[in-house]
Each structure stands twice: as structure tokens, then as C-alpha cells.
Image: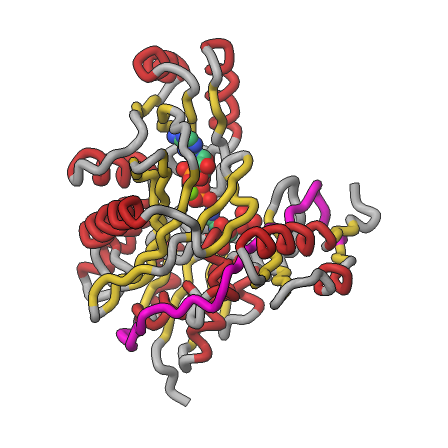
Amino acid sequence: MTPTAKLLLLGSGELGKEVVISAQRLGCHVIACDRYANAPAMQVADEAEVFSMLDGDALRAAIRKHAPDFVVPEIEAIRTEVLADLEAEGLVVVPSARAAQLTMNRDAIRDLAAGELGLTTSPYRYAESLRELEDAASEIGFPLVVKPVMSSSGKGQSTVRGPGDIAEAWAYAEDSGRGDRLRVIAEGFVDFDYEITLLTVSSAAGISFCPPIGHRQARGDYQESWQPAAMSAAALDQAQAMAERVVEALGGHGIFGVEFFVKGEEVIFSELSPRPHDTGMVTLVSQDLSEFDLHVRAILGLPVPPVRAVGPSASAVILAGRDSRAFSFTGLAEALSVEADHVDVRLFGKPETRPFRRMGVALVRAGSLDEARKAAAEAAGRVRIDYGDSE
Ligand SMILES: Nc1ncnc2c1ncn2[C@@H]1O[C@H](COP(=O)(O)OP(=O)(O)OP(=O)(O)O)[C@@H](O)[C@H]1O
Ligand SMILES: NCC(=O)N[C@@H]1O[C@H](COP(=O)([O-])[O-])[C@@H](O)[C@H]1O
Ligand SMILES: [Mg+2]
């Protein structure tokens, strides 16, 4: 069979795994890439390539070898200059090489959103040394959120409460670094009432939105999410208008996870991913078409109908506690016995555990958001990781 399209997926975690499944259901052939073998998306893809996507030569070689119709980034840490070069020669990058380049590092997307587009954000400064971080702190004040410009899922992120914590925050950011020279963003702490992800689809038919997703984070990483998040029509209007502007500025077709903080009626842009979002895993049970289905449809130029919400839903993460390669899961029967309209669990198939690594997610639909959140947390908590005999 000649496939509908050939996709080269750059990053093969849990989000990519669902992209592969959605794409294959529409007849695509997918080559999954990541820096380690047997990554989640590789387990379901047609082919796999193992290399560091920050290695420009290896990235170029993989693209030349497979000659994909679409290159689909799944993580930020990609040598995006290569994508820009090859896009100029006709390669199609999802949603666009510009979007991948501007979201690879936090400073580029922040400069676009706050600088060029004038969207409201937290106050911020960049720092390339402890001394510069101290200067940033004295300008912005405390608390201060410090993040490496290239990081995700909260890696290297910490909140500085006072001058005594600055050195520790710098050292923590350095520890999570990738060997390149460290640059951090220091953001004024936003004392928000709640935060949301607004999944925004850009397709041939224009821009459309999924109902807002509420979420709760710890250590900069998502713990639970729910849809629809309760918010005023005025706040939602503002968020949609801001999302539309930033998505249009980035260009291309696909789904974008646009993150906002909301305080009263004030909507503050935080950041965005030009791809499915982790908090959007809830859409696997909350919408007729998930964020992964929508991404693939937008990429392929297929119809993207208005999203139909199926009912109040929630997701809760299953995190590992320590390092192991000899682990197993128990408690699935108990987890799936939780009382709700619909209960499911996704175990991603990551070959190793690490402290706080996301290994799976519980997905629940129920009569109300409260019930869905409670049941999702209960189901996730019932899945246990047995670490075998490893330390
Ligand atoms: N300036 C801030 N004020 C208050 N809380 C913040 C601020 N910046 C980040 N946070 C909290 O930390 C979380 C993670 O931050 P952010 O989204 O910037 O990190 P990330 O590493 O890009 O996460 P991901 O890759 O999972 O989206 C936010 O969702 C929010 O809960
Ligand atoms: N917030 C971004 C996010 O959730 N990204 C998802 O996590 C994977 C990496 O997981 P790992 O660090 O456990 O390998 C990525 O590949 C992506 O699926
Ligand atoms: Mg985020």
C-alpha cells in the first residue's frame, strides 16, 4: 500500500505515541526518532531511528534518508536550524520551522509574545551567570521563577523566595543543563487564580479552539488536568484572541497548546507548544476527536470539524519514585475498578523509571468535574510500580 503520507516524528514519548496511532489510522507511515531505543512512539511506529536530535548532521541524515512528506517535532530540543534550512528547500515542517525555532527556547517565544505582539506576560529578565540572575532578582523582586531557556516539564525550574535562594536556583538550572552555555529566564511569580491550556487548531479552514483545559502543576510538571475548565466568557474570549495572534505569528498547520494564567478577569500568556500538550491527554476521553487526531487532520489538510465535548473528564499522572530498568506495574485491576462513567489507564511503555518520570496516566469521564478529578486521582494512585530488585 502507498501510505497517505510519510511522517518523520522527532521525539517519541507518550505524546508522540498517540500521534503515531492517530496518523496510522488515517493510513500514514511513521518513522519515530528519539535519543534512546524502544521509546514509547517507536513501539507503535512503522520504523525507528535512534540519534540525538540536537545533532544537526544526524538530523539532516535522517531526513535525507527517509524523505518524509512531513517532519513532526514532538519535543523542543531539536537542532531547528536544520529544519529551517531544509524547509527553504521544500521540506514541510509541522507546523513550521519558524514555530519550532521560536519555541525551542523560552527567550525566543517570550520575545515574540511580550515584545512583538505585546501580549501580557509575567515580568521577566534573562541571565547567563549567577551575577546576572542576582541583578534580575533585584529588578523583578521575589518570588521569582527561574527556568533554563531550553527545558520542558519543569526540568531545572525552581521558585526563588528570597536572596538566599538565588545561588541554589542557578546551580539547579545548571544541573539540568545539556552542556551548552546556560541561559535562564527569571519570571516574576504570577499569583494566579487558575491556569489553563487552550488547545488551538490551525488548519486549512482557519483557527478553532478546544474547550479550555484546567491543570495543576508541581515542580513545574503537570499532575492532573480536566476539561472543560470553568472560566468566564470574558476571560475565555481574551485567551482565544491572544492564542489566535500568537499561533498566526508562528504559522503553519497543526495543534498548539497555549498556556495561560488567569487572575480575576486578567489573562496572562505563559508559553506554548506547537504540538499536542501533555495536559491535553485528557482529550483522549473528553472529546470526540483527541488533540492527537486534530493534529494529524490539520497536518494532512483533512477536515477539522468543531470539537464535540463528550462530558466532564480528568487525567491524573502516574509518576515513578526512583531509578529502575526492572520494574513492573501492579494494581491495574484496582485502578480500573474505580467508580465513574469511564475509566482507563495508559501505560506509556518507557523502558526506565527515574524519580518523578511520568510513566502513565489515568483518564476518567464522570458526571461532574469534581467526580472526574477525584476518580482520576484515585485510579492513578492505585497503579503501583514494583521496582524489582534494582536499587
Ligand atoms: N511566572 C510564573 N508564576 C507562577 N507560576 C509559574 C510561573 N512560571 C511557571 N509557573 C508554574 O510552573 C508550571 C510550568 O512552567 P512552564 O510551563 O513554563 O514549564 P515547562 O517546563 O515548559 O512545562 P511544560 O513543558 O510541561 O509545558 C506552570 O504551568 C505554572 O504552574
Ligand atoms: N511537557 C512536555 C512533555 O510532556 N513531553 C512529553 O514527554 C516526553 C519525554 O518524556 P521523558 O522525559 O520521560 O523521556 C516527550 O517525548 C513528550 O511526549
Ligand atoms: Mg508549560
Q: Is residue 307 magenta?
A: yes
Q: Nearer the viewer, residue 82 or 278?
A: 278
Q: Nearer the viewer, residue 101 or 216?
A: 216
Q: Residue furthest right?
A: 389
Quadrant for residue 351, please give it.
bottom right
The part of the chain drawn in magenta is: 300-327
Compared with residue 204, is residue 228 higher up or lower down, i.e. above or below? above
Quadrant for ligand 1 reads top left
Q: Is residue 193 left or right of residue 282?
A: left
Q: Nearer the viewer, residue 194 or 318?
A: 194
Q: Nearer the viewer, residue 372 or 251?
A: 372
> Residue at the spot x=41%, y=57% of the render?
276
Q: Is residue 266 left or right of residue 290?
A: left
Compared with residue 132, is residue 311 higher up or lower down, i.e. above or below? below
Q: Quadrant of the N terminus?
A: bottom left
Query: Which color scheme is applied?
Result: secondary structure
Quadrant for residue 209, please give it.
bottom left
Q: Quadrant of the C terminus?
A: top right
The percent coordinates of residue 335 (x first, y second) are 72, 59
> Residue at the spot x=31%, y=73% of the render?
305
Q: Is residue 323 magenta?
A: yes
Q: Is residue 241 left or right of residue 271?
A: left
The percent coordinates of residue 85 (x first, y second) are 22, 55
